[in-house]
Amino acid sequence: MTPSTGVDPPFLEPFLGIVFDLDGTLVVSRHDFGRMRREVIRLAERYGVPAEHLSPEEPLHRILERARAEMQGSAFPATLLFRFEAEYAALLNSIELEALPRTRAREGAAGLLQGLVDRQFRLGILTRSSEEFCCKALAQTGLARYFSHLRTRSSPGPAKPSPESLRALLQAMEVPRDRALFVGDQLLDADCARAAGVRFYAVLPPPGEPTELTEDRFRRSGATAVARDLEGLAVQLDVLPPHSTLPAR
């Protein structure tokens, strides 16, 4: 593993627990995020949020934050805000589930996770997907058996990228922050880990996925290490010797 530049936080070795992002990191589902953003903006418009105040170019969580802020600033009745929350959750859930038939495990995922389980690591999932999609995707790809701790968009309390979501998951896993690692494939994951005071390893998106993410961008966002794929991550975590291949499981 190549050390990061600058001064790293005072993390302890060895790791006790590893938290993974789901979509893009362990599974590939190709959610229609563009449609999600457009549909949420249309929904917010129906609740009186001016369309020009929301942009489909922004990440989905930013759109939702702005829509909530607009409603709260306009003194919306709490009942309407709760109704909006319920409607957008149902909307996102339905679009997510459309991606389930094409969802597959990322190459090397099962071999990596089995290697970590064999070494007694505690494993968790932190995802912005719904609990229904998360559980069904893990079951469909054969990865469910590796995880007893999940935190999703459906979980009570703050959702990713709030650092409190990662801290709450680690608390449930009984893993101190300085003995934990978060692995993800987006800058949002890096931001969440940094804000929570948790070490972060990045995995570049799968080949063929449109992305502007690079190792340098992840490093600047606080990643301690960056892997091209899950085999590279397995080497960095000492699950796999260099120049080896993860077994199929």
Image: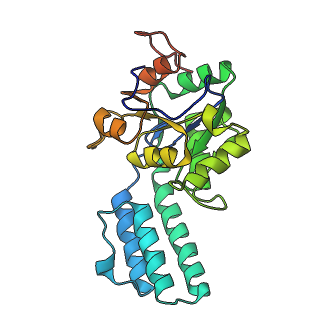
Quadrant into which the N terminus falls? top left
Quick check: 3 left or right of 209?
Answer: right
Q: Name the quadrant containing residue 131.
A: bottom right
Q: Is residue 208 visible?
A: no
Quadrant into which the C terminus falls? top right
157 relative to 27, above or below:
below
Where residue 157 appears, as percent x and y from the top left, is 64, 62
Q: Name the quadrant containing residue 180.
A: top right
Where residue 191 appears, as percent x and y from the top left, is 44, 48
Which residue is at the front of the view, 103 or 16?
A: 16
Q: How many marks?
A: 0
Where residue 11 appears, as percent x and y from the top left, is 57, 31
114 relative to 104, above or below:
above
At x 50%, y 54%, the residue is: 161
Which residue is at the front of the view, 200 or 134?
A: 200
Quick check: 237 left or right of 48?
Answer: right
Q: Is residue 183 visible?
A: yes
20 relative to 69, above or below:
above
106 relative to 128, above or below:
above
At x 45%, y 85%, the residue is: 47
Which residue is at the front of the view, 116 or 70?
A: 70
At x 44%, y 31%, the residue is: 224
Q: How is the image coloured?
A: rainbow
At x 31%, y 66%, the residue is: 56
Where residue 151 appears, as percent x and y from the top left, is 63, 50
